[in-house]
Image: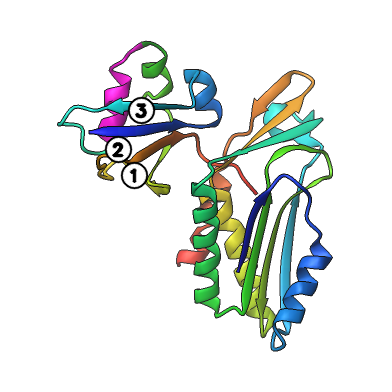
Amino acid sequence: MKINLRFFASLREQLGISDEIVSVPAEVKTVGQVRAWLIERGGIWAESLALSRNLRAAVRHEMCDDTAEIADGDEVAFFPPVTGG
Amino acid sequence: MKIAIQTNDFDVSAELAQLRIKHRDVGALASFVGTVREVTKGVNDAEVTQMELEHYPGMTEKSLTAIAQQAIERWKLNDAVIIHRVGVLQVTEQIVLVIAASKHRGDAFAACEFMMDYLKTDAPFWKKETTATGAHWVDARSSDVSALDKWTR
Protein backbone atom coordinates (compact mmCIF):
# COMPACT_ATOMS: atom_id res chain seq x y z
CA MET A 1 0.00 0.00 0.00
CA LYS A 2 1.05 3.60 -0.50
CA ILE A 3 1.59 5.85 2.50
CA ASN A 4 2.75 9.44 2.83
CA LEU A 5 5.62 9.78 5.31
CA ARG A 6 6.21 13.05 7.17
CA PHE A 7 9.22 13.98 9.32
CA PHE A 8 9.56 16.96 11.64
CA ALA A 9 12.08 18.98 13.63
CA SER A 10 15.47 17.43 14.42
CA LEU A 11 14.47 14.14 12.76
CA ARG A 12 13.71 15.97 9.51
CA GLU A 13 17.08 17.70 9.68
CA GLN A 14 18.93 14.42 10.30
CA LEU A 15 17.19 12.58 7.45
CA GLY A 16 17.41 15.57 5.13
CA ILE A 17 13.79 15.21 3.95
CA SER A 18 10.41 16.38 5.24
CA ASP A 19 8.16 13.97 3.39
CA GLU A 20 8.17 10.97 1.08
CA ILE A 21 5.51 8.81 -0.56
CA VAL A 22 6.39 5.13 -0.25
CA SER A 23 4.95 1.78 -1.24
CA VAL A 24 5.28 -0.57 1.70
CA PRO A 25 5.29 -4.35 1.29
CA ALA A 26 2.15 -6.29 2.26
CA GLU A 27 3.61 -7.51 5.54
CA VAL A 28 4.06 -3.92 6.82
CA LYS A 29 0.79 -3.25 8.60
CA THR A 30 1.58 -1.14 11.67
CA VAL A 31 3.45 2.06 12.49
CA GLY A 32 6.09 0.01 14.30
CA GLN A 33 6.57 -2.11 11.20
CA VAL A 34 6.90 1.02 9.03
CA ARG A 35 9.66 2.26 11.33
CA ALA A 36 11.45 -1.10 11.19
CA TRP A 37 11.12 -1.13 7.39
CA LEU A 38 12.68 2.35 7.19
CA ILE A 39 15.51 1.30 9.52
CA GLU A 40 16.34 -1.46 7.00
CA ARG A 41 17.39 1.27 4.57
CA GLY A 42 20.49 1.54 6.72
CA GLY A 43 22.78 4.57 7.00
CA ILE A 44 21.15 7.71 8.38
CA TRP A 45 17.72 5.99 8.40
CA ALA A 46 18.95 3.25 10.75
CA GLU A 47 20.71 5.80 12.93
CA SER A 48 17.92 8.39 13.15
CA LEU A 49 15.03 5.95 13.57
CA ALA A 50 16.84 3.44 15.80
CA LEU A 51 14.51 1.93 18.39
CA SER A 52 16.74 3.34 21.13
CA ARG A 53 15.77 6.83 19.91
CA ASN A 54 12.76 8.28 21.68
CA LEU A 55 10.43 9.14 18.80
CA ARG A 56 6.70 9.61 18.54
CA ALA A 57 4.36 8.91 15.64
CA ALA A 58 1.01 9.98 14.28
CA VAL A 59 -1.33 8.38 11.76
CA ARG A 60 -3.98 10.45 10.00
CA HIS A 61 -3.06 13.42 12.21
CA GLU A 62 -3.56 11.59 15.50
CA MET A 63 -0.83 10.62 17.95
CA CYS A 64 -0.43 6.84 18.07
CA ASP A 65 1.83 4.03 19.29
CA ASP A 66 3.69 1.30 17.35
CA THR A 67 0.71 -0.98 17.23
CA ALA A 68 -1.43 1.49 15.27
CA GLU A 69 -2.54 0.00 11.98
CA ILE A 70 -2.01 1.76 8.68
CA ALA A 71 -4.25 1.83 5.62
CA ASP A 72 -3.66 2.69 1.98
CA GLY A 73 -3.25 6.45 1.51
CA ASP A 74 -2.54 7.17 5.19
CA GLU A 75 -0.22 9.95 6.32
CA VAL A 76 2.30 8.54 8.81
CA ALA A 77 4.50 11.00 10.67
CA PHE A 78 7.55 10.47 12.87
CA PHE A 79 8.93 13.17 15.14
CA PRO A 80 10.80 13.86 18.38
CA PRO A 81 8.82 14.35 21.60
CA VAL A 82 6.92 17.63 21.31
CA THR A 83 8.04 20.87 22.93
CA GLY A 84 5.29 23.43 22.43
CA GLY A 85 3.71 25.82 24.89
CA MET B 1 -14.17 27.44 21.35
CA LYS B 2 -11.39 29.37 19.64
CA ILE B 3 -8.28 27.58 18.42
CA ALA B 4 -5.67 29.48 16.44
CA ILE B 5 -2.16 28.79 15.21
CA GLN B 6 -0.59 31.97 13.88
CA THR B 7 2.66 33.84 13.39
CA ASN B 8 1.35 37.19 14.59
CA ASP B 9 1.03 38.23 18.21
CA PHE B 10 -2.23 38.00 20.18
CA ASP B 11 -3.89 40.52 22.50
CA VAL B 12 -4.76 38.92 25.82
CA SER B 13 -7.11 41.74 26.91
CA ALA B 14 -9.03 41.58 23.66
CA GLU B 15 -9.42 37.80 23.90
CA LEU B 16 -10.68 38.03 27.51
CA ALA B 17 -13.08 40.84 26.61
CA GLN B 18 -14.54 38.83 23.74
CA LEU B 19 -15.30 35.96 26.11
CA ARG B 20 -16.96 38.24 28.68
CA ILE B 21 -19.16 39.84 26.07
CA LYS B 22 -20.10 36.51 24.52
CA HIS B 23 -21.01 34.76 27.80
CA ARG B 24 -23.11 36.68 30.27
CA ASP B 25 -23.08 33.88 32.85
CA VAL B 26 -19.29 33.54 32.96
CA GLY B 27 -17.92 34.62 36.35
CA ALA B 28 -14.37 33.33 35.99
CA LEU B 29 -11.73 33.61 33.29
CA ALA B 30 -8.45 31.80 34.06
CA SER B 31 -5.64 32.48 31.60
CA PHE B 32 -2.03 31.44 31.02
CA VAL B 33 0.54 33.08 28.75
CA GLY B 34 3.77 31.28 27.83
CA THR B 35 6.66 33.51 26.81
CA VAL B 36 10.19 33.25 25.36
CA ARG B 37 12.75 33.20 28.18
CA GLU B 38 16.28 34.52 27.82
CA VAL B 39 18.01 31.62 29.54
CA THR B 40 17.89 28.04 28.29
CA LYS B 41 18.70 25.18 30.63
CA GLY B 42 19.46 22.93 27.70
CA VAL B 43 22.71 24.58 26.66
CA ASN B 44 24.44 25.22 30.03
CA ASP B 45 22.28 28.23 30.90
CA ALA B 46 23.23 29.92 27.64
CA GLU B 47 21.53 33.13 26.58
CA VAL B 48 18.76 32.68 24.03
CA THR B 49 18.63 35.30 21.31
CA GLN B 50 15.62 33.93 19.46
CA MET B 51 13.30 30.96 19.25
CA GLU B 52 11.75 29.27 16.22
CA LEU B 53 8.58 27.22 16.50
CA GLU B 54 7.73 24.51 13.98
CA HIS B 55 4.43 22.66 13.89
CA TYR B 56 2.54 19.92 11.98
CA PRO B 57 -0.16 21.68 9.95
CA GLY B 58 -3.30 19.54 9.90
CA MET B 59 -2.49 17.78 13.14
CA THR B 60 -1.89 20.86 15.27
CA GLU B 61 -5.41 22.22 14.91
CA LYS B 62 -6.88 18.79 15.56
CA SER B 63 -4.74 18.28 18.66
CA LEU B 64 -5.51 21.66 20.24
CA THR B 65 -9.21 21.29 19.47
CA ALA B 66 -9.28 17.88 21.17
CA ILE B 67 -7.48 19.25 24.24
CA ALA B 68 -9.88 22.19 24.56
CA GLN B 69 -12.87 19.92 23.97
CA GLN B 70 -11.76 17.58 26.77
CA ALA B 71 -11.38 20.51 29.16
CA ILE B 72 -14.81 21.90 28.22
CA GLU B 73 -16.45 18.55 28.84
CA ARG B 74 -14.60 17.70 32.05
CA TRP B 75 -15.20 21.03 33.78
CA LYS B 76 -18.39 22.05 31.98
CA LEU B 77 -16.74 25.24 30.77
CA ASN B 78 -18.64 27.97 29.01
CA ASP B 79 -15.75 28.40 26.59
CA ALA B 80 -12.04 27.83 25.96
CA VAL B 81 -9.39 29.61 23.90
CA ILE B 82 -5.99 28.31 22.79
CA ILE B 83 -3.80 30.52 20.59
CA HIS B 84 -0.29 29.30 19.78
CA ARG B 85 2.24 31.21 17.72
CA VAL B 86 4.70 29.66 15.30
CA GLY B 87 7.67 31.01 13.37
CA VAL B 88 10.51 33.13 14.72
CA LEU B 89 10.04 34.82 18.11
CA GLN B 90 12.30 37.08 20.17
CA VAL B 91 12.98 36.96 23.91
CA THR B 92 10.02 38.29 25.99
CA GLU B 93 7.56 37.65 23.17
CA GLN B 94 4.32 35.76 23.82
CA ILE B 95 4.18 32.16 22.58
CA VAL B 96 0.88 30.71 23.77
CA LEU B 97 -2.40 31.82 25.33
CA VAL B 98 -4.82 29.45 27.05
CA ILE B 99 -8.09 30.70 28.57
CA ALA B 100 -10.79 28.74 30.40
CA ALA B 101 -14.12 30.51 30.91
CA SER B 102 -16.48 29.19 33.58
CA LYS B 103 -19.10 30.19 36.10
CA HIS B 104 -16.67 29.60 38.97
CA ARG B 105 -12.92 29.93 39.54
CA GLY B 106 -12.23 26.33 40.67
CA ASP B 107 -13.21 24.92 37.29
CA ALA B 108 -11.54 27.74 35.36
CA PHE B 109 -8.16 27.34 37.14
CA ALA B 110 -8.13 23.54 36.83
CA ALA B 111 -9.17 23.55 33.18
CA CYS B 112 -6.55 26.13 32.28
CA GLU B 113 -3.77 24.07 33.88
CA PHE B 114 -5.11 20.86 32.29
CA MET B 115 -5.03 22.39 28.82
CA MET B 116 -1.46 23.61 29.26
CA ASP B 117 -0.26 20.28 30.67
CA TYR B 118 -1.71 18.37 27.70
CA LEU B 119 -0.51 20.92 25.17
CA LYS B 120 3.04 20.42 26.50
CA THR B 121 2.96 16.68 25.84
CA ASP B 122 0.58 16.16 22.94
CA ALA B 123 0.47 19.19 20.65
CA PRO B 124 2.85 18.86 17.68
CA PHE B 125 5.09 21.91 18.10
CA TRP B 126 8.89 21.87 18.31
CA LYS B 127 11.09 24.69 19.59
CA LYS B 128 14.52 25.56 18.31
CA GLU B 129 16.53 28.06 20.37
CA THR B 130 19.33 30.18 19.00
CA THR B 131 22.24 30.87 21.35
CA ALA B 132 25.85 31.98 20.82
CA THR B 133 26.74 28.41 19.80
CA GLY B 134 24.03 28.18 17.16
CA ALA B 135 20.47 26.86 16.89
CA HIS B 136 19.54 23.89 19.09
CA TRP B 137 16.34 21.88 19.29
CA VAL B 138 14.85 21.99 22.79
CA ASP B 139 14.53 18.61 24.52
CA ALA B 140 11.20 17.47 25.90
CA ARG B 141 11.11 17.21 29.69
CA SER B 142 10.08 14.21 31.73
CA SER B 143 8.52 16.64 34.20
CA ASP B 144 6.00 17.55 31.51
CA VAL B 145 4.94 13.92 31.23
CA SER B 146 4.72 13.53 35.04
CA ALA B 147 2.55 16.66 35.16
CA LEU B 148 -0.20 14.61 33.51
CA ASP B 149 -0.46 12.28 36.54
CA LYS B 150 -2.58 14.74 38.45
CA TRP B 151 -5.28 14.58 35.77
CA THR B 152 -5.52 10.81 35.63
CA ARG B 153 -5.56 9.96 39.33
Residue picked out by circle 2: A31
| Dot 1 or dot 3, earlier in sequence | 3
Q: Label 2 neighbourhood size at 10 Å, few (<14), some (14-19), many (20+)? A: many
> In terms of secondary structure, where does tag 1 sit?
loop
Q: x%, y% of residue A67? A: 26, 43
Residue located at (59% from left, 78% from top): B77
Given the image, on which type of amino acid does mark 3 rest? Ile
Residue picked out by circle 1: A65
Real-space CA distance between mark 2 and mark 1, rounded to the nearest whole angstrom: 7 Å
Residue picked out by circle 3: A21
Magenta segment range? A31-42
Q: Which residue occupies the foreground of this view, B73 or B40?
A: B73
Looking at the rendered structure, whether the residues under marks 2 and 3 are on a common chain is answered as yes
Q: Which residue occupies the foreground of this view, B29 or B83?
A: B83
Label 2 with label 3: CB-CB less than 8 Å: no
| Dot 2 or dot 1, earlier in sequence | 2
Q: Label 3 neighbourhood size at 10 Å, few (<14), some (14-19), many (20+)? A: few
Q: Main secondary structure of the magenta part?
A: helix
Q: Is residue B48 visible to the viewer in this orientation of the structure?
A: no
